[in-house]
Amino acid sequence: MKERNGYVIVEASVLLPLASILILLLVYLCSYLYQGCFLTQAAYVTAFRASRFPERGEDYALSQLDGIMEGQALSFGKEERTVDISLLTVQVDLKRETPFSALGNEIPGLTASWRVLRRDPLAYIRGIRKLDEWREQDG
């Protein structure tokens, strides 16, 4: 009686493509999550840095953002950057398209947005010192 081992080849021809597709989807998901985290961090750091020196303007904030974006490992492609420095806040908005964004609105692109209050370190330190002086006078 002959042994038949052909079923192994048939199973492999079905399972290997499915396993390859699954691995590619997992790699894409991981890169999507990485880029989402990276954009959120970049928006926050840019907003924080711009809030410390708002008098330098939006060009300073965009140059800081460019420096941060140079360190990224992956990129899907087109992105939009907006920085708005108002009287009280600094707003940084980032939007990046993904390969599946072209398919329609069902799969949105990546977005990150941060609003940070403007900071004045000297005024903060002076305020803390005044509070300490008032406590010493009352106590």
Image (cartoon, rainbow, N blue to C red):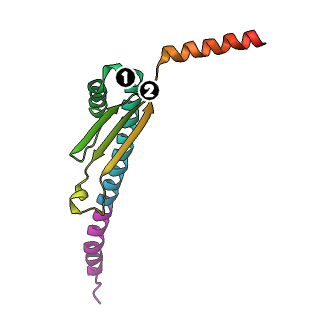
Q: Which residue is mark 1?
A: 54
**Magenta-tinted stretch:** 1-22
Residue occupying the far bottom of the picture: 1
The residue at 24%/48% (across/down) is 76
> How packed is label 2: few (under 14 Cα within 10 Å), some, or many (20 or more)?
many
Query: Residue 98, position in %: x, y?
Result: 26, 53
Q: Is residue 2 magenta?
A: yes
The answer to whether 100 appears left or right of 44 in the picture is: left
Secondary structure at badge 2 equals loop
Write down the quadrant of residue 67 in the picture: top left
Residue located 28% across and 72% down the image: 12
Measured as percent of width and height from the top left, residue 55 is found at: 34, 19
- The prevailing secondary structure element of the residues shown in magenta is helix
Question: Image point 38% across, 42% down: which residue?
Answer: 113
Q: Amino acid at mark 2?
A: Arg
User: In the image, what residue occupies the spot 25% across and 73% down?
Assistant: 13
The answer to whether 77 appears left or right of 18 in the picture is left
Q: Residue 127's quadrant in the figure?
A: top right
Q: Amino acid at mark 1?
A: Pro
120 to 27, vertically: above or below: above
- The spot of residue 79 in percent (x, y) is 24, 43
- Whether pointer 2 and pointer 1 mark residues with C-beta atoms closer than 8 Å, the reply is yes
Is 91 above or below relative to 9? above
Please state which of residues 74 and 111 is positioned toward the viewer in this rendering: 111
The residue wearing badge 2 is 118
Is label 1 in a helix, a strand or a loop? Answer: helix
First-in-chain label (2 vs 1): 1
Indicate yes or no whether the magenta region holds residue 118: no
Q: Of 14 and 95, which appears nearest the observer? A: 95
